[in-house]
Image (spheres, grey):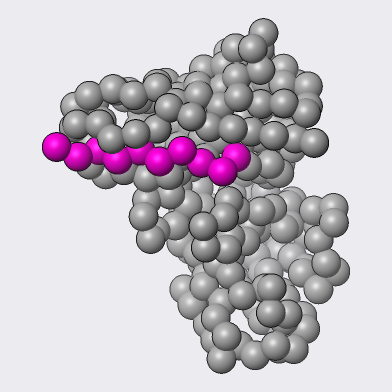
Amino acid sequence: DIQMTQSPSSLSASVGDRVTITCRASQNIRTYCNWYYQKPGKAPKLLIYAASTSQSGDPSRFSGSGSGTDFTLTISNLQPEDFATYYCQQSYSAPLTFGGGTKVEIK
Amino acid sequence: QVDLVESGGGVVQPGRSLRLSCATSGFTFRSYSLHWVRQAPGKGLEWVALILSDGNSKYYADSVKGRFTISRDNSKNTLYLEMNSLRSDDTALYYCARDLFCGGGSCAGIDNWGQGTPVTVSS
C-alpha cells in the first residue's frame, strides 16, 4: 500500500502569510496527488487535483506542485477563511490513502 | 446541483451489521465512480472503499476488507455500504463521495462529498 507522509502536522500563521505544506508518497505516484481542506463540522472540499490543477471556483492563492513522490501545497496571502485542516491524497492506486493532515491555525 | 445524502448510521453493538445508503441527484449516476470515506472522532480522513461506474470493480481498505461490501444501484441512483462484524474502531462519520474520474486503476480526485452519517460501535 502507498503511504502518504504529510508535514507539518500543524502550523501557526498570520493573515497575509505564505504557507507551504508537503506530502511525500512511499512510491512513485506520478501526478496522482490531490489536496483537500476541511473546516470543523464540515465535509472536505477538493482544492487541487492531479498535483497542480485547481478545482474550479477555488481562489488562485492555492497552488500545487510536484510529481513522483514529493508534492507541495502553497497558500499565498493567507486569508481568515483559510484556517482549516488540509489533507493530501494519492489516487494512483487502491487502496487510496490520505495523509495525516495539517492544521493551519491563526498565530 | 450535485447532491449526496447519506443515511443508515446509528449505534450498533460490536459484531453486528449495518447498511449505509447514499442517495444522489444532480448528475448522471451511472457515469461516475463513488467512494466511502470515514473520519473517526477528532481524527483524519480514512478512505474505505471505491466502486467504479460499471459496478463490477470494487476496492477496499485493508482495515475493512472481508467485512465491508460496497455496491450501487444505478436504477435508484444510490450507493451502499454493507458493514459486517463491526468493531469499535469502525466508529466514525461515514462520507459518500463522487470522483471526478476513475480509469486504468487510478482516480482523479473526489469533487463532491455528502455531509456524512455517523456510526458508533459500542456495547
Q: Furthest residue to the top?
A: B75
User: Is residue B14 located in the magenta-colored stretch of the structure?
Assistant: no
Q: In screen coordinates, is B112 left or right of A57?
A: left
Q: Quadrant of the N terminus of chain B?
A: top right
Residue at x 38%, y 60% (from the top left corner):
B42
| Of B36 and B118, the residue lying toward us | B118
| Of B48 and B39, the residue lying toward us | B39
- Horizontal and vertical percent position of residue B76: 64, 12
Q: Furthest residue to the left?
A: B123
Task: Reply above or below: A91 against B44.
Answer: above
Q: Is residue B49 visible?
A: yes
- Horizontal and vertical percent position of residue B98: 66, 35
Q: In screen coordinates, is A85 left or right of B17?
A: right
Residue at x 57%, y 85% (from the top left corner):
A106
Task: Reply above or below: B72 against B3.
Answer: above
Q: In screen coordinates, is A54 left or right of B52?
A: right
Q: Quadrant of residue B118?
A: top left
| Of A68 and A39, the residue lying toward us | A39
- Horizontal and vertical percent position of residue B96: 56, 35
Q: In which quarter of the image is the C terminus of chain B?
A: top left
Task: Reply above or below: A43 against A87.
Answer: above
Residue at x 49%, y 77% (from the top left corner):
A10
Q: In screen coordinates, is A69 left or right of B92?
A: right
User: Is residue B120 located in the magenta-colored stretch of the structure?
Assistant: yes
The span picked out in magenta is B114-123
Task: Reply above or below: B67 against A5.
Answer: above
Q: Quadrant of residue B22?
A: top right
- Horizontal and vertical percent position of residue A3: 46, 53
Q: Is residue A88 visible?
A: no
Residue at x 60%, y 40% (from the top left corner):
B114
Q: How many labels does the image show?
A: 0
